[in-house]
Image (spheres, rainbow, N blue to C red):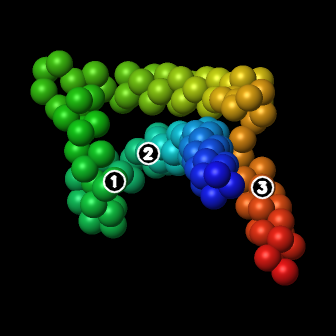
Amino acid sequence: SYAMLGMDLGLCLLMSLFVLYYGAVTNQHFQIHKQLLLDLKGLLSELLALKNIYFAPDNGRVDLLRKIGVEVYRKLFEMGPEGLGNLEFKRYIEKMLEAMEDMIESLTLQELNDPPRILGIKTDFALLQSIFLSLISLAAAVFR
C-alpha cells in the first residue's frame, strides 16, 4: 500500500517536472525568436548600408549565404522591365526593418506582461533548477 502510494507520488512529481520543463522551454522561445529577428535585422541593415559593395558585378568577397540573398534581391529589384530599382529596394528594406522592430517590441512586451504560466507561476530554467536542487537535497537528507 505504501509502495503504491510512493510510486503514485513519484509519478505525479515526474509529470509535474515535465510540465514545468516544457513551460520553461516555451518561455525561453521568446529570447530565441528575438535573437533570430535581431540577427536578420542586422543582415538586412548591412545589406542596405553596403549595397554598392554587395551588388557590384565583380564581388567575390561575399560569402555564399549573402551571395544567394543578393542574387534574389538583384532579380527582384534591378533585373528586367518590372525591376523596382534602388529607391524601391531601399524603401522595401526599411519597411522590413520597421516590421522587425515592431515584432521585437511585441515579443518583449508579451514576454514581460503575458508569459505562459503554469498554475499562475512563470516557469523558467532558474525555477526548474531551484526545484531540482531542492529535490536532490531532500532526497539526500532522506537517504542519509
Q: Secondary structure at mark 2?
A: helix
- Assess disc 3: are there few (<14), some (14-19) or many (≥20) residues with their C-alpha within 10 Å of its C-alpha: some
Q: Which residue is mark 2?
A: 47
Above or below 32: residue 88 = above
Whether tag 3 and tag 1 are in contact, CB under 8 A, the answer is no
For the residues bearing labels 1 and 2, Cβ distance under 8 angstroms: yes
Q: Residue at x 83, y 71 (%)?
A: 142
Which residue occupies 84% across, 80% down?
A: 144
Mark 3 or mark 2: which comes first in sequence?
Answer: 2
Q: Residue at x 30, y 45 (%)?
A: 69
Callout 1 secondary element: helix
The total number of labels drawn is 3
Quarter holding residue 23? top right
Query: Mark 1: which amino acid?
Result: Arg
CA gap between label 3 and label 1 equals 45 Å
- In front of the other: 89 or 57: 89
Task: Pick the residue in front: 85 or 39.
Answer: 39
Q: Disc 3 versus disc 2: distance between alpha carbons?
A: 46 Å
Answer yes or no: is residue 109 visible.
Answer: no
Q: Amino acid at mark 2?
A: Leu
Image depth: mark 1 or mark 2 in front? 1
Q: Is residue 121 above or below residue 124?
A: above
> Residue at horizontal 72%, vertical 23%?
114
Instruction: Choose mark 3 or mark 2, whichever is in front.
Output: 3
Residue 101 is tagged as: none
Pointer 1: what residue?
66
